[in-house]
């Protein structure tokens, strides 16, 4: 699983909110350089720019990160531009993300009636669609104007609706103003207002703390996710562009396995006792046909079965069978591979097993050097790790008319780098077969009960949020075999 993608998503969602520039509606073009650190190590920089162009306010935020995973450095570039009227009405947005050479873009125009026309491109394949602008949703300038109207009096608390162009969704945003305090910054110590924010992404409330001056310029942002401390500090250009420092972001998410767990046991049902490393952390586990979840004191009992028993799960959505920007199941190359991997008249379970085995062998350059590739890109490059295996397998399943989704979580491995017997962040596929979701893992060659699901998604990296707070905050206290499969 792309831990670097999750970190970048979190940082982008939290930082693409208001308060980065002056409150003057007609201020000259203003730039703010910022340094990004992860657990004290510099991993990148941001440039925030706001300017007035005729009747429009244009806000642009560019972020560049470099994150190391198991000795492999992954580079990420994200850019987002909003064009709004002087009173904060949305007009146009543009986004671009580039992860280890893989680029995705989108451009949207908001009509007067609230219709959004979006053109997106992933791996060179363009798609167009329309959506509706959520009532009351705001971009940067609208949110900045709302912040200025509310003021910085300690105790002030208000709710907004923040639109995130990167994943075409609006989320409730709660802002609370605290008393001013002294903060150490690269340029010296300053007295700044403490502003706490909570962005209510479904399944993942993102909390951050900003420190800003009386002109609403943010000088520091801090958030804690995945067990890691992310900080963004305002500084001069030389400071922001200083060399990055190495540091492995993946190690924090590894979970030690109990001595009692053996690879031979993983063909049988297993019952895990799971707890948070920090008491204040709220853990999240989806319940599926293969995974039964029970709250137990301050922890959870998660029972995983190798074969999905009968269940009363909700029916798949229509979108689970359709192509999207990252699962391009209708692309000629993907359709050709789907037929090559499994032909003839077969049952869905037989079809998915064919596809699982095919993807395992088809991706012959296995490694962590690919940032985050779509199914079509992987079909062409034949390289990647668990995420590329999962996206390609899910797209091949959809090409055969089988509903699929991407599961993310942890998987047991005997060794990973210098670590032995650990659970590592991982991604695999769930397919709707015989009235329930059943799992397939093309990266490891098979699904077994060493898989603990933390969330499910549709392949879009900006929607991989379910269960993120659990990564880096989880410990496995005990594991025991189950004599009878969970029902």
Image: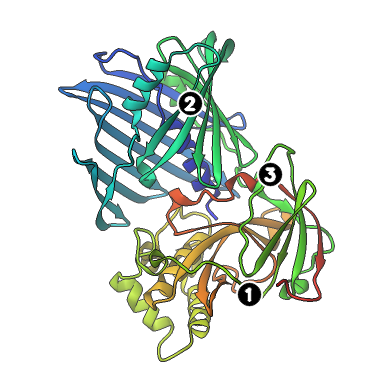
Residue drawn 32% across and 25% down? 141
Viewer-side label of 3, 2: 3
Q: Secondary structure at mark 1?
A: loop
Secondary structure under badge 2? Answer: strand
Q: Which mark is residue 35?
A: 2
Q: Could you say where residue 75 lies in the image, as x and y percent from the top left? A: 45, 43
Q: Which of the two discs, 1 and 3, labels the residue nearer the N terminus? A: 1
Residue 385 appearing in the image: no
Q: Is residue 157 left or right of residue 23?
A: right
Q: Position of residue 23 (x, y in %)?
A: 34, 14
Residue 9 in picture, x, y percent from top left: 47, 43
As rendered, which of 208 and 446 lies closer to the eye?
Answer: 208
Q: Residue at x 39, y 60 (%)?
A: 374
Picture layout, residue 267 above or below residue 115? below
Residue behind mark 3? 473
Residue 308: mark: 1
- Whether 273 is drawn above or below 449: the answer is above
3 or 2: tag closer to the N-terminus: 2
């Amino acid at each position: 699983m792309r831990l670097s993608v999750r970190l970048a998503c979190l940082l982008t969602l939290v930082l693409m909110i208001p308060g980065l520039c002056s409150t003057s509606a007609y201020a000259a073009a203003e730039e703010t350089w910022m340094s990004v650190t992860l657990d004290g190590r510099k991993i990148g920089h941001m440039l925030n720019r706001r300017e007035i162009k005729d009747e429009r306010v244009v806000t642009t935020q560019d972020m560049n990160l470099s994150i190391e995973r198991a000795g492999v450095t992954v580079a990420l570039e994200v850019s987002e531009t909003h064009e709004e009227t002087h009173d904060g009405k949305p007009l146009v947005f543009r986004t671009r993300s580039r992860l280890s050479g893989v680029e995705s873009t989108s451009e949207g125009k908001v009509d007067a009636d609230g219709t959004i026309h979006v053109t997106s491109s992933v791996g060179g394949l363009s798609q167009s669609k329309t959506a509706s602008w959520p009532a009351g949703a705001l971009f940067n300038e609208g949110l900045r104007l709302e912040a200025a109207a509310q003021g910085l009096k300690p105790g002030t608390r208000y709710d907004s609706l923040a639109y995130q162009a990167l994943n075409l969704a609006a989320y409730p945003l709660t802002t609370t103003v605290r008393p001013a305090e002294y903060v150490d910054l690269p340029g010296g110590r300053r007295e700044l207002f403490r502003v706490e924010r909570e962005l209510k992404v479904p399944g993942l409330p993102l909390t951050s703390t900003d420190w800003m001056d009386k002109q609403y310029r943010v000088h520091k942002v801090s958030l804690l996710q995945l067990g890691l401390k992310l900080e963004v500090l305002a500084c001069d250009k030389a400071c922001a562009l200083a060399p990055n420092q190495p540091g492995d972001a993946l190690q924090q998410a590894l979970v030690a396995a109990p001595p009692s767990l053996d690879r031979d046991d993983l063909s049988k049902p297993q019952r895990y006792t799971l707890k948070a490393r920090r008491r204040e952390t709220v853990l999240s586990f989806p319940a599926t046909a293969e995974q039964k979840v029970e709250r137990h004191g301050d922890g959870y009992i998660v029972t995983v079965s190798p074969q999905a028993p009968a269940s009363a799960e909700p029916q798949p959505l229509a979108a689970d069978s359709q192509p999207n920007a990252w699962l391009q199941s209708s692309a000629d190359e993907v359709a050709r591979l789907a037929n090559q991997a499994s032909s003839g008249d077969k049952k869905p379970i037989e079809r998915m097993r064919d596809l699982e085995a095919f993807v395992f062998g088809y991706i012959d350059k296995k490694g962590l050097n690919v940032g985050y590739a779509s199914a079509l890109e992987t079909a062409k490059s034949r390289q990647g790790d668990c995420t590329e295996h999962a996206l390609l397998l899910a797209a091949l399943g959809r090409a055969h008319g089988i509903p699929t989704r991407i599961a993310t979580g942890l998987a047991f491995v005997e060794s990973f780098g210098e670590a032995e017997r650990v659970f590592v962040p991982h991604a695999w596929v769930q397919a709707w077969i015989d009235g329930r979701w059943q799992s397939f893992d093309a990266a490891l060659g098979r699904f077994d009960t060493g898989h603990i699901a933390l969330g499910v998604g549709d392949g879009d990296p900006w929607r991989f949020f379910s269960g993120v707070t659990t990564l880096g905050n989880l410990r496995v206290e005990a594991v025991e075999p189950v004599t009878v499969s969970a029902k």
